[in-house]
Amino acid sequence: MAVKLLAYSDIASPVHRLNGVTKLLCFIIGSVTGMVIYDTRCLLALLAVSLTAFYLSKVPFKQYSFVLYLILIFSLLNQLAIFLFAPEQGTLIYGTRHELLHIAGHYSLTAEQLFYQFNVMLKYAVVVPLALLFLLTTDPSEFASSLNRIGVSYKIAYAISLTMRYIPDVQQEFVNISTAAQARGIDLSRKEKPGRRLKNAVSILFPLVLSTLERIEKVSAALELRGFGRGRRRTWYKTRPLTTTDAAVLTAAVLLSAAAFTVTFWDGSRFYNIFV
Amino acid sequence: MRKPVIEFERFTFQYRAQSEPTLHEIDLSIYEGEKVLIVGPSGSGKSTLAHCINGLAPHFYPGERSGGLKIMGEPADGWNIAELSDRIGTVMQDPDGQFVGLTVAEDIAFKLENDGVAHAEMVRRVEEAAAEVDFLDFLNASPQELSGGQKQKTTLAGGLVGGAPILLFDEPLASLDPHAGRSTVELIDRLHRESKRTIVIIEHRLEEMLHCPVDRVIVIDDGRIAADLPPEQLLCSDLLRAKGIREPLHLTALRYAGCEVTPEMRPRSVETIELEPGAGRLRSWYEANAAAPETAVREPLLELNGITFGYDPARPVLRDVSLSVGRGEILCIAGRNGAGKSTISRLICGFHKPIEGSIRLEGRDLLDDSIRERAQRIGFVMQNPNHMLSKPLLYDEAALGLLNRGVPAEEIRERVHETLRVCGLYPFRGWPVSALSYGQKKRATIASILVLRPDILILDEPTAGQDFRHYNEMMRFLLELNRGGMTLILITHDMHLMLEYGQRAIVLSEGRRIADAAPARILGDAALVEEAHLSETSLHLLARRAGISPEDEFVARFIRSEKELTS
Amino acid sequence: MRSSKGFSVRTIVAIGIGAALFIVLARFGSIPTGIANTNLQTNYAILALFALLYGPWAGLLIGLIGHTLADLISYGAPWFSWVIASGIAGLLYGLFNRGARIEEGQFGIKEIIRFNIGQIIANAVSWFVAAPVLDILIYAEPGDKVFTQGLVAGGLNILVVAVLGTLLAAAYAKTRTKRGSLTREA
């Protein structure tokens, strides 16, 4: 089973050199801004910024190409679904209707719908590079300490670190258990009838659950034995001081986001209307 | 006057879920700077003793304790696990469970992080601890890139880093290959000599542990202390055999030859023992025992020819490997972790397809057979029974494979009952699998495969993690199956298992087959042993020291008379 | 053992490793239904089981962490409305089963009914209400589309938890049977 996970790699770039905290905050600020605003001008500006950052990170294309294809397929399907379910959503939002092409029944292509769906796509396009960038350029070890630094309880931050530590192990176990099950005639693929597949899934999940519970016992004993949870705070081995560059980047991100919000909501609506 | 650092006084411990105490009235003192080995069969309470020392019992595994326990002169009741961890560093048997960091450095630092140590000091202390176990070059490695022995070095450094004056090892050899096990024993010894730390080791593999000196050996049996002696004296008593702990093989050999072993002979290790009176007797014993018969030529059942395979074709895991298994044979496949042992079994079972080469069963190419079709003929038993047991009840577990093949209900019943009888599990057929012991679970997984009536059984480390008694039970059961006509392939790095039960062994190294010979011969070849991450057995060394040649013939004769004596 | 503040160490580990299991199953453990692009997500059965075993807060965090990381790994960006819905589902699975004593081997008809009523409400709240409403609020997606998607996802999750979740919980309870209650048969 080929495993294609997005993985951090150590490249010398200005983005890699930024502190994990900075990248985490930029990702959060960028995502929230991208999610809330629907103003085309702001979205385009944000997209330009996030693509520039991506370019600066020098992450080779093949490291994320697979995920990029998945994203494209996913967003295409989403676009199609929006059109099928709500072909007049654009008209509803922008209040005008410029029909470009009648398709069939109550399906017509309007300029408003096109523009609305273009904006939906833009929103996704703004967030994806930021998320990929955060994932590909942040040392996973810095992830937990960064979360703790921005106020998340260290126990929860550490839980996330444990998740990343044990994904490969749990995955290996899943593969082992399901191949052994397959030898005994337990199959989850399309070769079996759906009802049977569900029943067969229990035969694979049950040993997986039991061994996961066993693992939880072992790991918690190990954490206890090394004093985890004894204090109200803890320190982190993988942590770096914030530099002036970090401060500058963070300030820029906050200012940019504030500007985007101001421009968007200046007229009291999150949408930018080109039709009036 | 020596200062006691761990003092048990009429100490009793009972787990909350159990009706009987696991430890009864333990009286035991361990002194500063001592190196103490605690041995005992599974279920004897030796792990519970470790848990009481480091506080897991009763803080993590709830239970009642009575009597006294003092750590560093103060009552242990007043401390929680974290506080105890400042005094006692624990290294557990499962390095995977204990390796909680994303990299080596973070894992070593874990205790310091929890103690809130400042960053600069933390970096310095992590480097010191890593240097102490000689592991500085791997600070940035992730656990997935490391071998079992390397992971253990990491957890060892993680135990050292807190500066605790006592180090507690709970079965440190359990998941290591012989070579890594030997290095661990030597490393622990070095740590003991170079620092003033007190060292307590819980382990049932006595011979391996005694490769380096210890001050005292404590034998735990049935929750009580059965012996507390210096190793030399313990080895000369009958206690070990009576308590089901395997004595070092060189002593068994001397016993067969009729030599009396006394503490003055320094019998701790085959390297230290005085052989002056014994060597002559060993030689005459050797001559009195007939040569082992040549093994019969067998008709090949399974043949692998020129197998090459890799998950990434550019970096093959197996390169041009050929081997054949005769009908009714017991073949061992050995090699260090990552040598391709388990990949071979996965290829045979059809989980992967080879890039080149063929796999034939009774002359027929298996290339187009699915996993399921092959499973009809070739059974695969995984190392961890919990990975295979998918039904809550034993009967259902054994019936599962037949049910999935649409066998009629009446026939299923018959075959399941027959198989459970063969496996000695018939009285438990209505039990939940979880109520079975580890050894019984293991047999349950074998039963679930045997019902399909395969021609070959492949077992991955069939005796891993089991004590001497359970090891014997499991192997006697497999031998029984073999006598009934079952062909067995055992994937293992347990040298005793290879020696005692393997009729032939294949050694893999870096994806190539480097040997195909009788196990006694392989284990006598220093270069092979080194490459396959095994280690020389004490029997070979004993033969060499007694001037017996060829060494492997001595070993073969020893194994043969041992089988005659125990069966 | 409760530690100084809030979660016990065991709960923290259960959250971390439970989320890892949730993610692995999100990627490899979905069962095709036979209808294009609709899969049975077995990981929600696991979420329900872990919420039952380790409580509502563990459920909430496994849902949030698991879904966020699973999205990040496979799509590059988390779809926050559904992430939050997964968290709510985990929280509610746990809340409705507070005080269940599955650890002691108790999971009979009464517990099964309670578990299932709880999970149906939890899934309904999360997928019929929370996910689509958040989709509209956050992403301004069309109502018809998101409610249909929520209906399908919620319905499938109810089915998965009802079958897989119940079977797994019952099987787990059986492993907790007391040793004393067993006798050998001749």
Image (spheres, grey):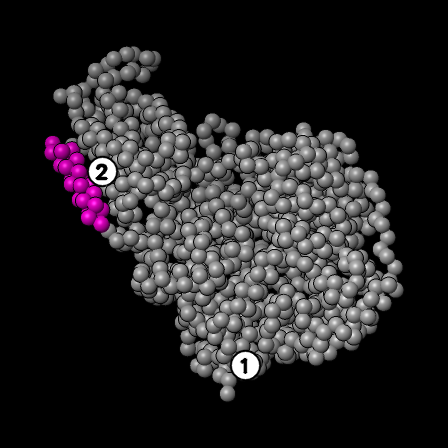
| Residue C15, numbered label | none
Q: Is residue B529 left or right of residue B277?
A: left
Disc 1 or disc 2, which is closer to the eye?
1
Indicate the secondary structure of the residue bearing disc 1: strand
The span from disc 1 to disc 2 (Cα, nearest Å) is 65 Å
Closest to the observer, A21 or B80? A21
Q: Is residue B264 left or right of residue B24?
A: right
Quadrant that contains the C terminus of chain B: bottom right
Quadrant of the image occupied by residue C71: top left
| Residue B29, numbered label | 1
Q: Is-magenta flag for residue A254?
A: yes
Q: Is residue B155 above or below residue A108?
A: below
Residue occupying image coordinates x 70% and y 79%: B264
Q: Is residue A190 left or right of residue B404?
A: left
> Residue A38, image x and y in percent?
21, 31
Q: Amino acid at mark 2?
A: Thr
Residue occupying image coordinates x 22% and y 46%: A246
| Residue that carries the numbered disc 2 in the rendered image | A33
> Residue A82, image x and y in percent?
32, 25
Q: Which residues are magenta?
A: A243-267
> Residue A1, image x and y in percent?
53, 36
Q: Are marks 1 and 2 in contact (CB under 8 Å)?
A: no
> Residue C102, image x and y in percent?
50, 57
Q: Is-magenta flag for residue A110?
A: no
